[in-house]
């Protein structure tokens, strides 16, 4: 089965860059027709899609976060990463990675999520 695991610091200072890595096992991030998503959920709010990278390395970002978001991948390690720059306390959230199937809005596999707090 496919498993996804988020990793990275749980505490980031304001104005710094949040960096998270999603490690995928049981499936390749280069397998055709899959997208690899970053999603977050902040307290009292619903899930917010942040962006994705597909099997060819193409990226797309949420318009509201595009100026601060960079998604990349390392195919040799079967990992993809999220960088969110200039963070503020409003970026405090649980961050998830997930696998999406082309043509759907669903993620069939999710990581367990990782709490990231932005605070000085």
Image (cartoon, grey):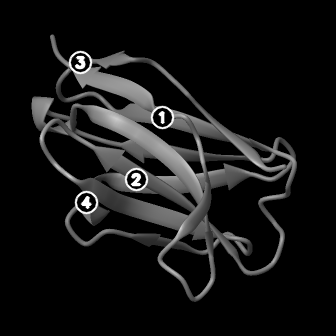
Q: How would you rate the neighbour count of disc 1 (Cα within 10 Å): few for under 14, some for 14-19, many for 20 or more?
A: many
For the residues bearing labels 3 and 4, Cβ distance under 8 angstroms? no
Compared with residue 94, is residue 119 higher up or lower down, i.e. above or below? Answer: above
Residue that badge 1 annotates: 113
- Residue behind mark 3: 13
**Tag nearer the camera, 2 or 4:** 2
Q: Marks 3 and 2, how far apart in space? A: 20 Å
Question: Residue at 37% across / 33% down in the picture?
Answer: 18
Determine whether, in the image, residue 84 is placed left or right of residue 7: left
Q: x, y (%) of residue 61? A: 38, 68
Q: Nearer the viewer, mark 3 or mark 2?
A: 2
Q: Earlier in the sequence, mark 4 or mark 1?
A: 4
Q: Position of residue 20 (x, y in %)?
A: 50, 34
| Earlier-in-chain disc, 2 versus 4 | 2
Q: CA distance from mark 3 to mark 4?
A: 18 Å
Tell me, yes or no, whether the two marked residues, 2 and 4, touch with CB atoms within 8 Å. no
- Would you say 31 lies left or right of 38 here? right
Which residue position holds label 4? Answer: 65
Q: Nearer the viewer, residue 44 or 92?
A: 44
Q: Which residue is mark 2?
A: 39
Say left or right for 5 vs 96.
right
Give me the C-alpha separation between circle 2 and circle 4: 12 Å
Q: Residue at x 16, y 35 (%)?
A: 43
Find numbered disc 2 in the image and state the secondary structure of the residue it sits on: strand
- From what the image shows, is residue 57 above or below residue 117? below
Query: Which sits earlier in the primary sequence, circle 3 or circle 4?
Result: 3
> Considering the numbered disc 1 on the image, is that residue within a helix, a strand or a loop?
loop
């Amino acid at each position: 089965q496919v498993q996804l695991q988020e990793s990275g610091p749980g505490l980031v200072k304001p104005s710094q860059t949040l960096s998270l890595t999603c490690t995928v096992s049981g499936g390749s991030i280069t397998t055709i027709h899959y997208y690899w998503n970053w999603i977050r959920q902040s307290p009292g709010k619903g899930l917010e899609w942040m962006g994705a990278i597909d099997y060819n390395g193409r990226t797309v970002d949420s318009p509201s976060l595009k100026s601060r978001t960079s998604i990349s991948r390392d195919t040799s390690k079967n990992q993809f990463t999220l960088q969110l720059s200039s963070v503020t306390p409003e970026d405090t959230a649980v961050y998830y990675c997930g696998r999406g199937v082309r043509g759907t809005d669903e993620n069939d596999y999710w990581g367990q999520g990782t709490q990231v707090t932005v605070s000085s």
